[in-house]
């Protein structure tokens, strides 16, 4: 088989003619010697400070070095988690901005990788290369040790081939990928800040309302004078879904009717449920409960306990979901959604506490008291909070797009499939 113009065939496929193929450990320093002064304090990076998708660490500690303290490294090194499950999860970081002499140490479960003159000289390129699935998977396949405590041995890199571009191209590729990572980090920060804003705004609006100056003390706390306290059961009918038994029976499952399970409530942070991939048969539907578009749902068990969702589809709900029917005309469904969202922790740790498998029944839910502003104010509050949610959803979509872009760029640029122009 011949290769295309400007490329050559190797054991890992086509690579550019001016790139060379070598073993990873020949191109990169593996656990290079680093000297620290015994008894001195240095920056310390623990395993849980590493991210699975960012070159940045979340924090750095300060500890005193002794000879058995852990792996030693310096600015410009790359730390690769070698123990399961951190290795499989892709925990890796690029060491930089260490204070003092730029040296530090960390978990004993790190493999330290460093640039090597005449080979891979850009430490950022090392970082991205270790994140490339083809390289990482080969390292993971060479893990040794007992189940649950398997580790990537340092010598695993003696057998892993990698394509090495000229240093100028290493730098250009790394700069492009770093720019995407910076955009990912900034978007992550925007999401975090917006989530904090939403949390504070939700508390403010659901307790103080809009423009009130007079307040009163009630059984659920201080609320504006014009608001009421009502039980959930007094403004809606709370019913539970139903799951045909036995689970998985082809008489009931795998048909053509939408089947809504608890996993649909937690698979994303969107307010609305717009689709479900699960299906139920007509016979299964007769043994379940049908709900219409616009119905407010609440998880009543497991990971979805206390998680609300408004469905935009009709379908049938399983017994891990409660539905709110016959909602009073004085209650706005979206406002009720935010009330329930503010009560998630209350549902989990107060109402459902003290049992091995916490769950909410319809009686418990119906007895919960909530604040009820006038309908117009409910709508205004819901509109303000949904605007924040809309902003969050846009940023999360942007983050997903950036991560997808990064994955594609890594595959194209690190293999030489797409060349970059070097000034």
Image: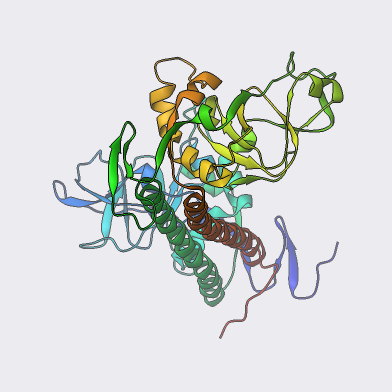
Image quarter hosting the C terminus: bottom right
Q: Nearer the viewer, residue 32 or 213?
A: 213
**Name of the residue lying farthest toward the bottom:** 423
Q: Position of residue 268 (x, y in %)?
A: 59, 44
Q: Residue at x 63, y 65 (%)?
A: 409
Q: Residue at x 40, y 31 (%)?
A: 346
Give the answer, above or below, for where 94 lies relative to 423: above
Q: Quadrant of residue 248?
A: top right
Q: Is residue 30 visible?
A: no
Display colour scheme: rainbow
Q: Quadrant of residue 300?
A: top right
Q: Position of residue 387 (x, y in %)?
A: 52, 59
Q: Position of residue 413 (x, y in %)?
A: 63, 67
**Name of the residue lying farthest toward the front:** 226
Q: Is residue 98 visible?
A: yes
Give the answer, above or below, for where 188 lies relative to 310: below
Q: Position of residue 207 (x, y in %)?
A: 36, 45
Image quarter hosting the N terminus: bottom right
The count of marks equals 0
């Amino acid at each position: 088989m011949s290769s295309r113009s400007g490329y050559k065939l190797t054991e890992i496929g086509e690579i550019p003619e001016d790139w060379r193929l070598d073993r990873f450990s020949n191109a990169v320093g593996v656990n290079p010697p680093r000297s620290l002064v015994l008894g001195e304090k240095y920056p310390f990076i623990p395993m849980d400070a590493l991210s699975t998708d960012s070159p940045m660490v979340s924090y750095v500690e300060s500890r005193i070095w002794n000879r058995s303290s852990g792996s030693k490294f310096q600015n410009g090194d790359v730390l690769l988690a070698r123990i399961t499950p951190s290795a499989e999860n892709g925990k890796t970081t690029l060491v930089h901005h260490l204070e003092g002499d730029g040296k530090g140490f960390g978990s004993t479960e790190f493999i330290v990788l460093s640039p090597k003159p005449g080979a891979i000289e850009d430490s950022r390129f090392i970082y991205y290369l270790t994140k490339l699935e083809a390289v990482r998977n080969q390292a993971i396949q060479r893990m040794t040790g007992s189940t649950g405590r398997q580790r990537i041995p340092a010598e695993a890199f003696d057998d892993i081939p990698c394509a090495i571009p000229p240093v100028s191209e290493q730098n250009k590729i790394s700069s492009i990928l770093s720019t995407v990572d910076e955009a990912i980090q900034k978007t992550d920060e925007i999401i975090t800040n917006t989530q904090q804003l939403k949390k504070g705004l939700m508390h403010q609006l659901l307790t103080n309302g809009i423009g009130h100056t007079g307040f009163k003390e009630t059984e659920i706390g201080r609320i504006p004078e014009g608001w009421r306290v009502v039980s959930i059961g007094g403004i809606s009918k709370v019913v539970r879904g139903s799951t045909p038994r036995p689970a998985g029976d082809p008489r009931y499952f795998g048909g053509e009717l939408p089947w809504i399970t608890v996993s649909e409530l937690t698979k994303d942070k969107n307010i609305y449920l717009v689709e479900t991939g699960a299906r139920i048969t007509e016979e299964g539907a007769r043994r379940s409960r049908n709900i219409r578009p616009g119905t407010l749902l609440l998880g009543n068990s497991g990971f979805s306990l206390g998680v609300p969702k408004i469905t935009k589809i009709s379908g049938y709900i399983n017994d891990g979901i409660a539905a709110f029917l016959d909602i009073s005309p004085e209650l706005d469904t979206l406002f009720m959604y935010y009330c329930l969202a503010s009560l998630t922790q209350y549902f989990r740790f107060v109402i459902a506490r003290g049992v091995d498998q916490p769950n909410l029944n319809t009686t418990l839910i119906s007895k919960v008291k909530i604040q009820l502003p006038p309908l117009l104010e409910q709508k205004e509050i819901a509109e303000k909070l949904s605007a924040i949610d809309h902003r969050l959803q846009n940023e999360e979509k942007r983050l997903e797009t950036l991560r997808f872009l990064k994955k594609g760029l890594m595959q194209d640029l690190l293999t030489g499939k797409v060349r970059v122009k070097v000034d």
